[in-house]
Amino acid sequence: MRNWLLLAPFLLGGCSWLAPDYKRPTMDLPTTWSGSATVTRDDRTWWHGYGDPVLDQLVQSALHDSDDIALAGNRLMQARAQYGYAFANQLPMLSIAGSDAYGKFANGRVSALDESLHFPNKTSNLGFVGGMLTYELDLWGKNASLSNAAKAGVHAGVYAMDAARLSIVAGVAKLYFSLRALDQNVALLKQTVQTQDDLLALVQRQYDVGATDALTLENVRERRDTVHELLPDVEDQRDRAESALALLIGQSPQDIIQNEVPRGRPLGEMTLPEAAPSLLPSELLERRPDIAMHEQMLMASNFNIGFARAAYFPSISLASLAGVNNIDIDNLYRATGRAWTLGAAMAAPVLDFGRTQNGVRLAKAGKNEQVILYQQSIRSAFKEVRDALLAQKTAADREGDTTSRVASDENRLRLTTLRLENGYASRIDVLTAQAIFQQAELAQVSARLQRLDASIDLYKATGGGFKIPAQRAAAAP
């Protein structure tokens, strides 16, 4: 028995040797990105690059009050508690034990032995109080596997928290830019409505005096009606975008109903992110928190196999009991007897009708599922990066085209106005040129929004400056 006591400290830690050796699944990754593509800087506060203090304030509000981040934080607390519980199962448990019984010991006559053992020939209380130490020997690494799986779950929770933050920040930035674009669209459409009203009034007067035909009048009226119909839809989109942004940043119901979301700089004054150093495709695995989360879940499923396999082997438990007892509970600490016991128990499966076997199969199937999810997250990440790079180039080209168009239409309006002042053009020509210029401005706002959205998508696709700290990677089970 003493040999068991000497071995106990070495058995406390256990080992998860029944779990398969973890190997990161390999995938065929590209060595370089197509073309001369560049990606975002390693900056965890990338949204500051747009140069809008109001956006910075909204992001901070979302990071502090968002329900999605609060849920991710709560799940992380659960994972930590689960790890603490699993880790504690590897250690001995000390408890207090006590009992009290009422009865009588009678042998017909009181002997000298009865007197020495304090067994009076009368009805008495039999009391005991002491401590109990119990411990399950983790010879097969069952508890160690469970603890390591829970530890991987904690790491997965941390990465899930980072992924939630990245998603929330990207969502806030996109909604804010959409709101600012819709603000500009509403203002431009109101100007366009006024221009079309003025143009229709002039054409109507010309028609009344016979200076133009009915077809020209109806064409102008149709354009005016189209703009009038479009304005309420854009105003509704703006209001919905504002409500969605208020919800995302965690505003109270009262603020959602009564207060407006603050506005900052117009889209045209937003600072576009600078060109960034190149990022190797292999580095993407360390920059995407969702990929890191899926890998930790894969590690956890790997340890779950070791936990399931341990059910094939015997379970060995040690128990030690030490305390004091007395035949008279009222006089427990006088003339008392002191006792201790140390025992071991073993239970081994003989016939479980495939329970353990199917438990192992279930754990292996769970690991295969996590392998698929991990590989799927990598494929999705590269697809998102590719789409973001292409969208960024397309958006930059489109914004360049619309900028040229705005400059051309603005110059046309200026020249038409000069012709009007010198008697070579009519008021209708000026209003027509003004309407064309306003349409070009609307297209420019749309192109600017597309480019800003593409930059956000690229930040998000490349992890938004996220990078696994070396100390955290080293701490992974």
Image (cartoon, grey):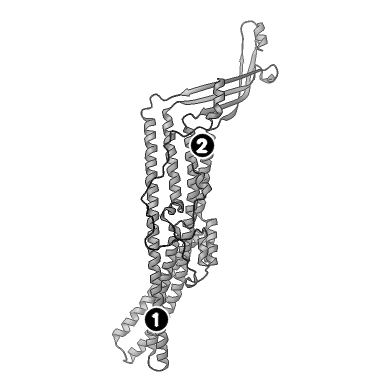
Q: What residue type is labelled 2?
A: Ala
Tell me the element at label 2: helix
For mark 2, does the 10 Å Cα neighbourhood hold few (<14), some (14 to 19), or many (20 or more) residues?
many
The answer to whether one can see residue 78 in this image is no
x and y percent of residue 268 in the render? 47, 72
Write down the residue under mark 1: 408
Seen at 67% across and 10% down, the residue is: 116
Query: Image check: 337 left or right of 427?
Result: right
The foreground one among 246 and 471 is 471
Q: Name the residue under label 2.
A: 86
**Relative height, residue 319 to residue 234 (above, below):** above
- Which is nearer the eye, 16 or 249? 16
Q: Which amino acid does label 1 sit on?
A: Ser
The image quarter in which residue 110 lies: top right
**Residue in the picture at 52% in, 47% down:** 472
Furthest residue in direction front, as rendered: 31
- For residue 10, say whether it is visible: yes
Q: How far apart are marks 1 and 2 (CA)?
A: 70 Å
Q: Nearer the viewer, residue 248 or 446?
A: 446
The vertical placement of 473 against 123, above or below, is below
Marker count (numbered): 2
Of callouts 1 and 2, which one flags the residue occurring earlier in the amino acid sequence?
A: 2
- Residues tagged 1 and 2 counted as in contact (Cβ below 8 A): no
Report the mark closest to the observer, 1 or 2.
1
